Amino acid sequence: MIKKRICLYMIGLFLLSLGVSFSIQADLGVSPVSSLAYAFALATGLSVGMMTVVANILFILIQIIISKRFDLRESSVQFIIAFLFGFFMDVTLFLVQLLPAPETLLVRWAYLVVSLFVVAFGLLGYFASKFPKMPYDELTFVISERFKMKVGKAKISSDLLNVCVAGIVCLIFIQSLGSVGIGTVIAAYFIGKILGWLIKHYQEHIVQWMNSGNERHPKKDKMTIAS
């Protein structure tokens, strides 16, 4: 079962990065979770993957400050995940850039729609594997615990703050909103909706696949996924 979970986790992270890459190519604004990393990339001229690692290190530091607790093992695991996701970002962005450039508004919107579904599929696998979460997702739970907020409300708060900081970074360094746009708003709303639909139709099959051949745990697990 552990091999299947690892496989599902890696596929999930890859699809997440692929979806973000499609949204970058659409140039209508990226999802809140990647807005700061992309803003850093636009401001510095460095790769999106490298700036993804930098942004996630920042999220780890914020976790430590808010929780007033430092766990070397937990932080190290998050750093490894951030590095892996950053690597996937550069790989998938390279692959997406091999496709025809979206020169018309219609094609750009098509790329954006594709990104929504690819990210949602990535989240389905990423959460279903029940492996450690990326720093941004862990930060949401830290905020929820520290300020006694529901996870959903903490998620909205962290998304809004991330998007605002990303917008400010872009305005200062490139004199435009850059990573923030209508696509950011659409992603914030629709990815959760799409993920909910995917959970309803595919969650049971994924759990059955992970548990197949596992005689010690014949019963189905129920996945808990925060959208």
Image (tube, rainbow, N blue to C red):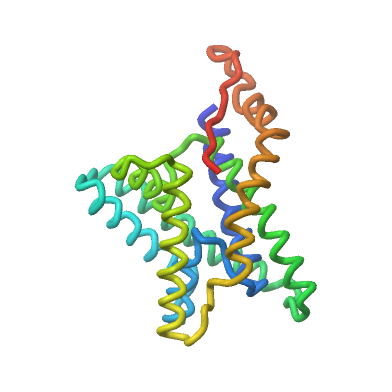
Q: Is residue 204 above or below residue 20?
A: above
Answer with the quarter of the image where residue 96 lies. bottom right
Q: In this orientation, does residue 3 appear?
A: yes
Observer-nearest of 14 and 163: 163
Q: Is residue 68 left or right of residue 210?
A: left
Location of the N terminus by quadrant is: top right
Determine the residue positioned at 21% across, 45% down. 69
Answer with the quarter of the image where residue 225 lies. top right
Observer-nearest of 195 and 76: 195
Determine the residue positioned at 69% across, 40% down. 198
Q: In this orientation, does residue 50 appear?
A: no
Determine the residue positioned at 48% across, 44% down. 152
Determine the residue positioned at 48% across, 56% down. 85
Q: Is residue 29 above or below residue 88?
A: below
Q: Is residue 110 left or right of residue 129?
A: right
Observer-nearest of 172 and 114: 172
Location of the C terminus by quadrant is: top right
Q: Position of residue 153 (x, y in %)?
A: 45, 46
* Number of numbered callouts drawn: 0
Q: Is residue 213 left or right of residue 166?
A: right
Q: Position of residue 226 (x, y in %)?
A: 52, 40
Q: Position of residue 42 (x, y in %)?
A: 48, 79
Q: Position of residue 16 (x, y in %)?
A: 58, 54
Answer with the quarter of the image where residue 197 lies. top right
